[in-house]
Amino acid sequence: MALKDETASFLERLPLGRNRPVLRYASVLAICALCFFVRWIADPVMPAGYPFVTFFPGVILSTFLFGIGPGILAAVLCGVASWYCFIPPSFSAKFSGGVMFAMAFYALVVLIDVALIDWLQRMNRRLAVERERSRKLAERGEVLFRELQHRVSNNLQVVSGLIALQKKSVSDEAARAALEEAARRLGLIGRIHRQLYDPHGDQLHIRDFLDQLGPDLIDASGKPGICCRVIVEDDFALEPDAAVPMALIIAEAVSNALEHGFGDRDEGRVEISAQRTADGMLELRVTDDGAGLPTGFSLEQTNSLGLKLAQALARQLGGSFDLVAGRVTTALLRLPDGDTV
């Protein structure tokens, strides 16, 4: 990759020495002299009829490295040298029909070479300009994207704060609890919003997502003695459209464990795990070693707004949400694997 970048950078600088004409034309003279020397050394072993064999590369190299002006100079010098020294009769200024045909062929070939190389370099410079313009536009778009996400997140936090302030003026306990829950959910969405949308287009992975979400929920609960552990057997990309409802469901499961499972305890363990199953589902489990579910608990008959919201969000994603009693209490979210990757 580095070699490709270096090659592209070199090609974008062609032709070389655009601000140093003396160096350009001196280099062309050196290239022509080298071509002449090689042809002179090879002349004794060369068959007749190849006067231009070492001069074509010199013209091409001169045009490629230094541009159309030096390329034309190289074509003229190489043409004169090959005609005068290597086309019989050597070292003679005579023109015959054969000599004229050979020189016309040489002129046509080098004209095409010089024109094509110059056209390709013009196109390459134009592409370099467009690439630089696209890079600047991309940088500007990234800055605007970050600013937008920052403002959205801040606005959500502001709304959460306003609801929390409004709660203080409400005397009804049920209304206060509802406002507090709404403020908490908005605050959660605001905190994870920056995490979900990457301006570079990078996808969010489930392990990183849960590693940040779990401890964040514990910190927000005000119970630092609760230990949160995240287990992901097989990491995979997570779609942002599925991440927001998933975060709210997990947040509700963790909050339910903290409120009811650890209502009178400041220490305990919450475990968040994610795994794919053989039947093509994604299972997310939130388990806790708290007090457990009440006897006869039924999720379908609960009056908890949060649990009803978790069920609705799970159905929105094409999955299901349930609470399972046992040695530990488990909140189980099952989603079709295709909705999250």
Image: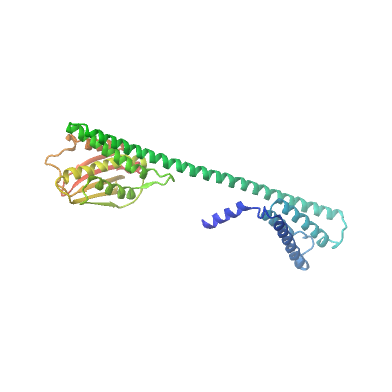
Query: Residue farthest to the left?
Result: 295
- The answer to which of 46 and 74 lies nearer the viewer is 74
The residue shown at (23%, 46%) is 286
Across and down, in percent, residue 1 comes to 51, 56
Quarter of the image for the C terminus: give it. Answer: top left
- Residue 11 visible, this angle: yes
The residue shown at (78%, 57%) is 77
- The answer to which of 202 and 258 lies nearer the viewer is 258
Give above or below for 94 relative to 336. below
Look at the image and name its color scheme. rainbow
Q: Is residue 340 left or right of residue 168?
A: right
Across and down, in percent, residue 105 comes to 78, 52
- Count of marks placed on residues: 0
Q: Is residue 111 left or right of residue 84?
A: left
Q: Is residue 314 left or right of residue 95?
A: left
Give above or below for 35 relative to 333. below
- Residue 311 visible, this angle: no
Residue 298 quadrant = top left
Across and down, in percent, residue 316 comes to 30, 35
- The answer to which of 207 and 268 lies nearer the viewer is 268
Across and down, in percent, residue 26 comes to 72, 59
The residue shown at (74%, 52%) is 72
